[in-house]
Image: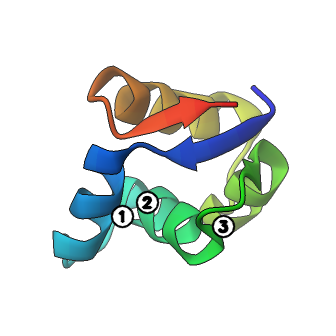
Amino acid sequence: MSMLVLTQQGEQAAQNIQGRGPDFTVLSTLYENSPTATDFEEVMEALNTDEVKASMVVRRLMNQGLVQET
């Protein structure tokens, strides 16, 4: 994984989600940088976790159609 952006559905989700947790952290981080792509390293830092755990969160969001790689 390198650069990440929100899909149109992901942007809507980021605007409508209120809460906590890793999914919210990733969506809000990408939304703050939108429309510019965000480096995976920045997502790892926002989550304060290692590459494996950050990758699991991002892959889950990708499977939901909220995030995509550029």
Instruction: Quarter of the image for the C terminus: give it.
Output: top right
Q: Secondary structure at mark 2?
A: helix
Amino acid, disc 2: Leu
- Determine which of the numbered discs, if any, sits on residue 24 in the image: 1
Where, by quadrant of the figure, is residue 64 drawn? top left
Residue that mark 3 sits on: 46
Circle 2 residue = 27
Q: Is residue 19 left or right of residue 70?
A: left
- In the rendered image, residue 62, in percent from the top left (x then y), is placed at 42, 28
3 or 1: tag closer to the N-terminus: 1
Q: Is residue 16 above or below residue 60?
A: below
Q: CA distance from mark 1 to mark 2?
A: 5 Å
- How would you rate the neighbour count of disc 3 (Cα within 10 Å): few for under 14, some for 14-19, many for 20 or more? some
Labels 2 and 3: the sequence-earlier one: 2
The reply to whether dot 3 and dot 1 touch (C-beta < 8 Å) is no
Is residue 42 left or right of 15 when viewed as pictured? Answer: right
The mark total stands at 3
- Find residue 32 and name its label: none
Pair 1/2: label in front: 2
Q: Is residue 19 above or below residue 22?
A: below
Image location of residue 12, percent across then percent down: 24, 61
Residue 19 placement: quadrant: bottom left
Are the residues tagged 1 and 2 within 8 Å (C-beta)?
A: yes
Q: The residue under label 3 is which amino acid type? A: Ala
- Identify which residue is drawn at 61% across, 40% down: 54
